[in-house]
Image (cartoon, coloured by chain):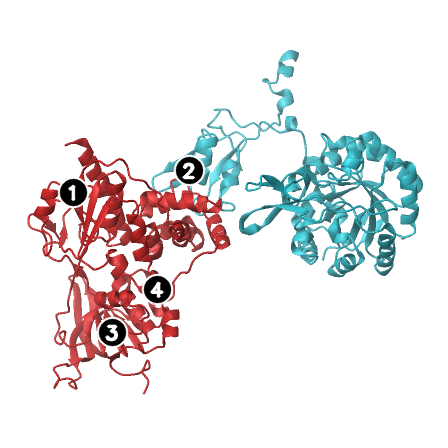
Amino acid sequence: MADLTTDFLGIRTPNPFWLASAPPTDKEYNVRRAFEAGWGGVVWKTLGSEGPPIVNVNGARYGAVFGADRRLLGMNNIELITDRPLQTNLDEITRVKKDYPDRAMIVSLMVPCEEQAWKDVLERVTETNADGIELNFGCPHGMAERGMGSAVGQVPEYIEMVTRWCKENYNKPVIVKLTPNITDVRFAARAAKAGGADAVSLINTINSITSVNLDTMAPEPSIDGKGSHGGYCGPAVKPIAMHMVAEIARDKETAGFPISAIGGVTTWRDAAEFMAVGAGNVQVCTAAMTYGFKVVQEMISGLSDWMDSKGYTTTAELVAQAVPNVTDWQHLNLNYVAKAKIDQSLCIQCGRCYAACEDTSHQAIWMKEGRVFEVNDSECVACNLCVNVCPVENCISMEPMAVGETDPRTGQKVLAEYANWTTHPNNPSVLEKA
Amino acid sequence: MAVTTRTPGVTAGRLDRETLTSNFADLHGELSPHEAHVAADRCYFCHDAPCITACPTSIDIPLFIRQIATDTPKAAAKTIFDQNILGGMCARVCPTETLCEQACVREKSEGKPVEIGRLQRYATDVVMAEGTQPYQRAKPTGKKVAVVGAGPAGLSCAHRLAMYGHDVTVFDAKDKPGGLNEYGIAAYKSVDNFANKEVDWLLSIGGIELKQGQALGRDIALADLQNTNDAVFIGVGLDDTNKLSVPGAELSNVTDAVQFIANLRQSTDYTDIEVGRNVVVIGGGMTAIDAAVQAKLLGAENVTIAYRRGQEKMNASRWEQDLATAKGCTILPNLQPHSIAGNDTGRDTGNNAVSAIKFEYTTSTATGLQGTGETVSLAADQILMAVGQTLDGAQDGIAVKAGKIQVEGAGRTSVDGIWAGGDCASGGDDLTVTAVAQGRDAAEDIHAHLTSGD
């Protein structure tokens, strides 16, 4: 059986599944139960400065986007950082870490952008014996209006400055949590690295309005008839998060920089994918909030089984395996030619491929007598839309054409050589050179 | 001694009122809004969907299901009613397992079709509950049309004609309108007086005058209708039943299944309906199933459906056959009635009742069905005949073909100005939904005829 023990920044945990800084990790009661359920580590719900705790709204703080049968596909929230006294949290962190020495205990922090504020809180956190800290530069609502959270994360110079303060005042790993509400996340990651961070974690939640109540004309979740944008998370954000993780993993300046991936991890497969594009471990929140702590057990068994089936013995072996295959469009092989192929034995004759192709793509599927759907290779550009709309798994596939065959659409022979846009004759810059 | 399921003879009250009420409750039940959403989400919104083709009224099923999925059940109902104004009843009685749901690609792929029938009921029930009529009459045209028969065909025809602004008079032989919807459907498929409510709702469009107790040939003459109207539509159904022609068929408690079903439908609590201890139903169609299942639900101890051909030849769908067996009925195929024996006890009173029926086994040969000579006897204190219905007297001058009024195109009979549809007309299956389609199409043709001036 594969060993799921994961070393992230020298912090060893029995598996790569950590609970992200969020409501599931906001108190001792929860965290103890999470550890009992099997979670490898937690990032404790963000702490603020000493003083009166922040307050939360007293109405709905979560909004949702549902799929069929009310499957939660996306969630947003307008909850702020911890609303309990700093010392209460620190005492609980100390106790829990003492009882679970083999699990990661990371403390998430967000204090005003002044060095003294950070010094003060770091002194207190050091006493807890926690394994490290995570700087919350991502929270997009409420705290950002007060100059914290994503207000810091959106300015690379601030990221670098605050990270440096933390490294100077704390001697354990510093993880910088990044906001996706930014044009190019690589600048934020580079700033974290420049400031001396040990790792970045991403993504925090995405600015969002989940829905509008058409009776009250108020955005959801509504508080007394008004709504504020909240942070979007859950399965729906995974593709966005994965892109951002991959961008940092393949950026020359940050390649190899440790990443803790966050964003819609719901199953073992999501975790494996994030790790394949460069994450050393993953953090989970929405899946636990939807299904409870027990969900980690499927993630553990699933990842382990899959690693066994592929011959991976440690999680470190799979990290970044897919990174070399993440590239720019201009480097994709334009000599690669594929055609859609419909397996008639699996086809259930729904005709969705036909409607999609005929109405919105390349008119490359025939509807023949008896509802038989066939691909017209002379028109098919292998766009994959038919595959995406087909309700039957593996019914339609994209079959590569063999070298030397003639593409009936272009009349050109399929070439063995790799050739991309940078050398294509239609590329204006190539024309200029000629 | 109290009457029980084992009390010999034919008697009412074998089961208490509470059990009967539960036995005759809604067979399929309503979908809750959440169940409807889940069911609707299974629809693939197929291109040129096979379910639409399979529906005799061609309802745009994927569209109405998507309208349910997006929280607009009234729009879904409108999509249904546009094609089938009796969509509420059809949702309850259609053999969907041999129509839309059989064609559903999910049936092909996983053996579990989208629950089209129940979804149709969900949508139409919303409008029925509101009681709102989604259609308005066009400006009156001054044209008059007589519709004979207030069954599915006649009602469908009348509504469409009224919508176009014509004045319609519907003549119906029975006490209540609805035809087979009112009299000919198993009680558990149309609970809570639905058929009657649906007719009221349909008539609320206005422009339709309903005249009950008016039988063609008895109270009204076709020639008079032709003289006083611009067009006539005949949808009188098949009001006569076939009888057995074996010795003993005249014995008491050998009766029509159709009448048995009608009595049940008109009963308020079923405690007044008599049923035998050993009931034998003869036939293989929907009427046989409806009679047998209901006999069992009334408390008969043994109910047997005897059918002269192989079970695969039964007109009742496989789903209906399974319903019968699940309710405890026995289906015995390849048995044709040989003779019926009486119990002599009533001989003195002239009320010799059936006590047993003898069948001969059959086999299918190249030249047709043949008896094998081997026989079997079943105890029977009630025999229900469900061996087919026929047209009750053809009208002079109208061509009849194979026992039905011959029609061409959209229900045109051999006589100019007279259309026909539903079970009494040739073509199509004898189904409610087919009758609705034929009534609607005849109305369109009549409207075209009346407005083109030809």
> Which lettered chain is shown in cyan?
A
Q: Earlier in the sequence, mark 3 or mark 1?
A: 3
Tell me the distance, in whole angstroms, between the alpha carbons under discs 2 and 1: 42 Å
Q: Place residue A202 in its image quadrant.
A: top right
> Which lettered chain is shown in red?
B
User: On the same chain: label 3 and label 4?
Assistant: yes
Q: Chain of mark 2?
A: A
- Within 10 Å of disc 4 (Cα), the crowding (few <14, some 14-19, many 20+) is many
- Residue topped by disc 2: A374
- Residue topped by disc 3: B280
* Amino acid type assigned to the residue bearing label 3 in the image: Val
What percent of the width, then of the height, locates residue B85?
31, 47
Tell me the distance, in whole angstroms, between the alpha carbons under discs 2 and 4: 46 Å
At horizontal 40% and vertical 35% (from top left) the residue drawn is: A366
In the rendered image, the vertical position of residue A268 relative to residue A259, given as above or below: below
* Amino acid type assigned to the residue bearing label 2 in the image: Glu
User: On the same chain: label 4 and label 1?
Assistant: yes
Q: Earlier in the sequence, mark 3 or mark 4?
A: 4
User: On the same chain: label 2 and label 4?
Assistant: no
What percent of the width, then of the height, locates residue A112?
85, 38
- Within 10 Å of disc 3 (Cα), the crowding (few <14, some 14-19, many 20+) is many
Q: Are marks 3 and 1 in contact (CB under 8 Å)?
A: no
Image quadrant in which the C terminus of chain A is located: top right
Which mark is in front, 3 or 1? 1
Tell me the distance, in whole angstroms, between the alpha carbons under discs 4 and 1: 36 Å
- Residue topped by disc 1: B412
User: On the same chain: label 3 and label 2?
Assistant: no
* Amino acid type assigned to the residue bearing label 1 in the image: Arg
Q: Are marks 4 and 1 in contact (CB under 8 Å)?
A: no
Q: Chain of mark 3?
A: B
